[in-house]
Every structure is written in structure tokens, then in C-alpha cells.
Image (tube, grey):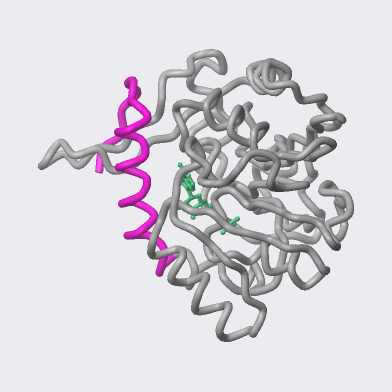
Amino acid sequence: MSSVRRSASEAESRRANRADWDRYADEYQATHGDFLGDIGFLWGPEGHTEDTLALLGQVAGRDVLEVGSGAGQCSRWVRARGGRPVGLDLSFRQLQHARRIDVETGVEVPSVQGTATHLPFADASFDVVFSSFGALQFVRDIDQAVADVARVLRRPGRFAFSITHPTRWMFPDDPGEGGLVAEQSYWDATPYVEVDPETGDTLYVEHHRTIGDWVRLLHRHGFTLVDIAEPQWPSDHDRVWGGWSRTRGMLTPGTAIYVADRLA
Ligand SMILES: C[S@@+](CC[C@H](N)C(=O)[O-])C[C@H]1O[C@@H](n2cnc3c(N)ncnc32)[C@H](O)[C@@H]1O
């Protein structure tokens, strides 16, 4: 695998990331499943949960959509608290894991295969839409994705999502000291693309927006920004997850959680 910075269309991003998550799903669930918890709502590798951050507001009795739901751990948490969740994910293998855990736990969440840029739901279907490190940083047509969230939300309705903190874009994805030295511009939004050096196939694509880009994007689609949570690294937390580690987490934010409302 080699990585480059170059443009990537929505279709290319979707094709590459679907195949990547299908390939990676078994390893991902084996490595992180216990930490995620089968009925657990984790907002990011720092380990903060919805139980403690309470960013979604009330979910009991509400229709809730999880975009990029993976194996459905967060949606199962919503279900266990009396909500009516639905999951949507690009990867069939991730959804197979969701089904497996549904059966194992007896807490079942309906989920569909699809993409964040074409939500297959009627207008005003949900009270809450959320994504925990789900689709948003894998999508190129982010205006389309946020417009679709606005469309399927009732008013009032809440949209909350966690992403890699935009400032991490400047640093190599290294959990050690190497990950503390900025080596590229925060403002250069040229996508990160992984390529198979033998075939030239695109293997993975990630898209970057600055903090201000996200604020303007939400504003454009009629959202009122409520919060940008930047959870701190807990002093007793030692888990390494990809580029997230105590070494970096004590100095720089690794996760940003945007919370925004469509008002009545
Ligand atoms: C890091 S996982 C997050 C899922 C879950 N919250 C977790 O922590 O395991 C990212 C998920 O986003 C999904 N995804 C990537 N691009 C997507 C897209 N365009 N539309 C919907 N889901 C997408 C992937 O298939 C993957 O399951």
C-alpha cells in the first residue's frame, strides 16, 4: 500500500471505502469489539460514552438514525434506552457483524446497506441523526450528505457526529512521538488516498474539512450549532487505537463531536 494526496470523486471514495471496510470488518470487530461493547455508545477512542457526554438529548420514544452504524453497537445502546434506532452502513460485512451481535444479545436493530449521501428514508422520518466516527470523513459530497440529514430530520431535530479532530490532519497518523510533529498544512484539503502499488487500485480515501468548514456546512443546511465537544484524554486511559494514544491525547485533541439542531 502507498499513500498519496490527490482528488477523489464521490464514486471512487465510496467504491474504495466499501471494499476497505468489507476487508477490514472482521479484524476491526475482533480488535475493538470488546472496547466498543455490544450495547455500548462510544464517541471515540478516548473512551467517552453517550452515558457521560449526553449529547443526543432524550432518545426514549424517539426515531433515531445512525449513519455509518458499523456493527450497530451505538444503535443497540439507543434501543436499550427505549429509542427506535435504524442503522445505515456502506459495508455489507460490517452489517453481517451487526446481525451477529443482534442475535447474540437479543437487542435487535434494523439496518440497511447504503451510503450517507443517499439516505433511503422519507422526509422528516427521524428525531435524531447521529454518527460516531461513521461515514462523514469518508464522503466527498459532504454537502449532499448533510442536506440529506436535514431532509430526513423532523423539526425540532438533532444531528450529532464525531470525526477525527480536524487538527489531526496536520500530523502523521502515528501514535508515538512522530505523531506530534506537524508535517502538512491544516488548510490543504486534498484527500488522503491509499493505492495498491501493483494494480493502481484505490484502496481507501479520507476527506478533510477544517473546523470552520464544518461550521459553515451546518449553517448552510439550516442547522444551529449547539456544541463542538473536544473530549480530553482520561488520565487513566492507556489504550492505543490507530493514531490515538495517550502520548498524543494528553497534548492534542483526537476527536471532535459536533452537535447541531434543526429548530422548529
Ligand atoms: C469507524 S466505523 C464506525 C462505526 C461504529 N460507530 C464503530 O465505532 O465501530 C466507520 C463506519 O462507517 C462506514 N462508512 C464508510 N463510508 C460510509 C458511507 N459513505 N456511508 C455509510 N457508511 C459509511 C464504514 O463501513 C464503517 O462501518
Residue projecting furthest to the front: 122
Residue projecting furthest to the left: 198
The rendered magenta stretch, by its main secondary structure, is classed as helix
- The residue that appears at 38% across and 60% down in the rendered structure is 24
> Which corner quadrant of the image does residue 16 belong to?
top left
> Which corner quadrant of the image does residue 187 belong to?
top right
- The residue that appears at 52% across and 59% down in the rendered structure is 70
- The residue that appears at 55% across and 37% down in the rendered structure is 136
- Residue 206 x, y percent position in the rendering: 44, 34
- Residue 11 x, y percent position in the rendering: 32, 33
* For residue 43, above or below residue 252: below
For the residue pair 147 and 234, the one nearer the viewer reads as 147
Judged left or right of residue 37, residue 95 is left
Q: Is residue 25 magenta?
A: yes
- Residue 58 x, y percent position in the rendering: 88, 54
Residue 6: tell me if it is visible: yes
* For residue 98, above or below residue 186: below
Q: How many marks?
A: 0
Judged left or right of residue 135, residue 14 is left
- Residue 113 x, y percent position in the rendering: 44, 56
For the residue pair 206 and 168, the one nearer the viewer reads as 206
Judged left or right of residue 1, residue 37 is right
Q: Which residues are magenta?
A: 1-27
For the residue pair 181 and 27, the one nearer the viewer reads as 27
